[in-house]
Image (cartoon, rainbow, N blue to C red):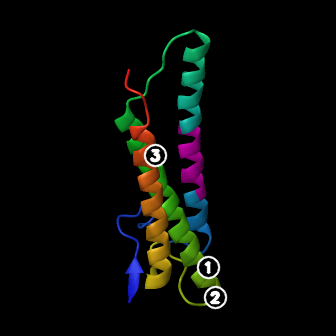
């Protein structure tokens, strides 16, 4: 049985091989830029001797969003790898064999659990 990527950010992308990967990388770069902005605000507040607290739910939500984005990119890369072997079209939301899809979903679940644990570790202020 084959599995498909649900609710993917890249699911609407029907493009030439390689374009899905480029879009995924661009999305990751945007997410990394957002994290840099938050980090800069935190460092600025530290320099002024002020507390900069991000609520745990915001940290968890942003972390899980990043984990899902990374999952989408992994899925698109797997689809492209299949296409490179002549087994698919390279569309970012292709069907993957259950074994491969299960591995990707397990990685996503691990990342989401890590996000929840990190959010719980944030001290209340």
Q: Is residue 87 left or right of residue 106?
A: right
Q: Is residue 16 left or right of residue 98?
A: right
Q: Are marks 2 and 1 in contact (CB under 8 Å)?
A: yes
Q: Quadrant of residue 49?
A: top right
Q: Observer-nearest residue: 118 or 35?
A: 118
Considering the numbered disc 3 on the image, is that residue within a helix, a strand or a loop? helix
Question: Which circle, 1 or 3, is nearer the viewer?
Answer: 3
- Residue 85 badge: 2
Q: Quadrant of residue 59?
A: top left
Q: Position of residue 76 (x, y in %)?
A: 53, 70
Q: Which residue is mark 1?
A: 81
Point out the image quarter for the C terminus.
top left
Q: Position of residue 35 (x, y in %)?
A: 55, 37
Does the magenta portion include 81? no
Q: CA distance from mark 2 to mark 1?
A: 6 Å
- Residue 63 badge: 3
Considering the numbered disc 2 on the image, is that residue within a helix, a strand or a loop? loop
Point out the image quarter for the N terminus.
bottom left
Considering the numbered disc 1 on the image, is that residue within a helix, a strand or a loop? helix
């Amino acid at each position: 049985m084959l599995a498909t990527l649900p609710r993917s950010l890249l699911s609407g992308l029907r493009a030439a091989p390689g374009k899905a990967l480029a879009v995924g990388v661009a999305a990751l770069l945007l997410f990394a830029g957002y994290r840099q902005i938050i980090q800069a605000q935190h460092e600025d507040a530290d320099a002024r001797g002020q507390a900069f607290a991000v609520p745990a739910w915001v940290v968890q939500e942003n972390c899980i969003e990043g984990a899902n984005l990374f999952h989408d990119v992994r899925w698109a890369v797997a689809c492209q790898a299949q296409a490179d072997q002549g087994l698919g079209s390279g569309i970012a939301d292709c069907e993957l064999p259950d074994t491969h899809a299960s591995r990707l979903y397990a990685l996503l679940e691990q990342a989401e659990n890590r996000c929840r644990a990190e959010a719980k570790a944030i001290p209340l202020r």
